[in-house]
């Protein structure tokens, strides 16, 4: 991230990046780094896998071979198989709940502007099975919080 000037980007998108970062410390470091790159009035969009993706069956993902996923907590490794690619080896992710993400955002000086979860509303042309009630993914829309040098991030 050091290749870019601070505050350079009006929009930052991180799609599924945080699903694979193994520790809270590493996630917080990455979030602080992205915050530094975000323009003062910019927005950051994080697309992450919700814990529900690891315990349900989906058209493009399977968890049936990993019953241990059902007992996973924040920070635990889980496995999932992608069904829409030729390589069917399990992918390993790290569970991170909404509450944990919100603590990480706050510690990194980021405020939550909006959350989309589930993504489907039921008004789409597609007839959904469970996507209006069970969210495989969550989209967080974040902004920079002002920083008080003495006390850290300040609430807006």
Image (tube, rainbow, N blue to C red):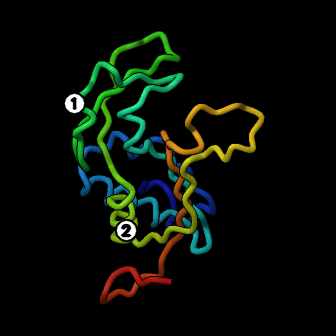
Give SS at disc 1: helix
Q: Residue at x 39, y 46 (%)?
A: 18
Q: Position of residue 151 (x, y in %)?
A: 31, 87
Give the residue drawn at x 77%, y 34%.
Answer: 125
Q: Which mark is residue 108?
A: 2
Taking depth in this image into account, of 73 and 110 the one nearest to the observer is 73
- Towards the viewer: 143 or 36: 143
Instruction: Judge left or right: residue 125 versus residue 56.
Output: right
* Element carrying mark 2: loop
Residue at label 1?
68
Q: Is residue 88 left or right of residue 44?
A: left
> Mark 1 against mark 2, which lies toward the viewer?
1
Please name the residue shown 61% across and 58% down the image.
Answer: 11
Which comes before the other along the chain, label 1 or label 2?
1
Tell me if residue 34 comes above or below residue 65 in the rendering.
below
Tag of residue 146: none
Q: Residue at x 45, y 59 (%)?
A: 34
Q: Residues within 10 Å of mark 2 (few under 14, many from 20)?
A: many
Q: Nearer the viewer, residue 4 or 88?
A: 88
């Amino acid at each position: 991230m050091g290749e870019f000037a601070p505050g350079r980007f009006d929009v930052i998108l991180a799609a599924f990046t945080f699903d694979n970062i193994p520790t809270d410390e590493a996630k917080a470091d990455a979030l602080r780094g992205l915050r530094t790159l975000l323009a003062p009035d910019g927005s950051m969009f994080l697309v992450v896998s919700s814990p529900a993706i690891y315990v349900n069956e989906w058209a493009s993902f399977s968890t049936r071979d990993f019953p241990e996923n059902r007992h996973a907590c924040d920070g635990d490794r889980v496995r999932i198989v992608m069904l829409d690619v030729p390589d069917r080896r399990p992918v390993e992710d790290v569970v991170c709940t909404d509450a944990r993400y919100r603590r990480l955002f706050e510690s990194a000086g980021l405020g939550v502007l909006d959350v989309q979860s589930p993504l489907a509303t039921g008004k789409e042309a597609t007839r959904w099975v469970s996507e209006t009630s069970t969210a495989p993914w969550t989209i967080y829309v974040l902004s920079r919080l002002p920083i008080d040098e003495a006390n850290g991030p300040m609430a807006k």
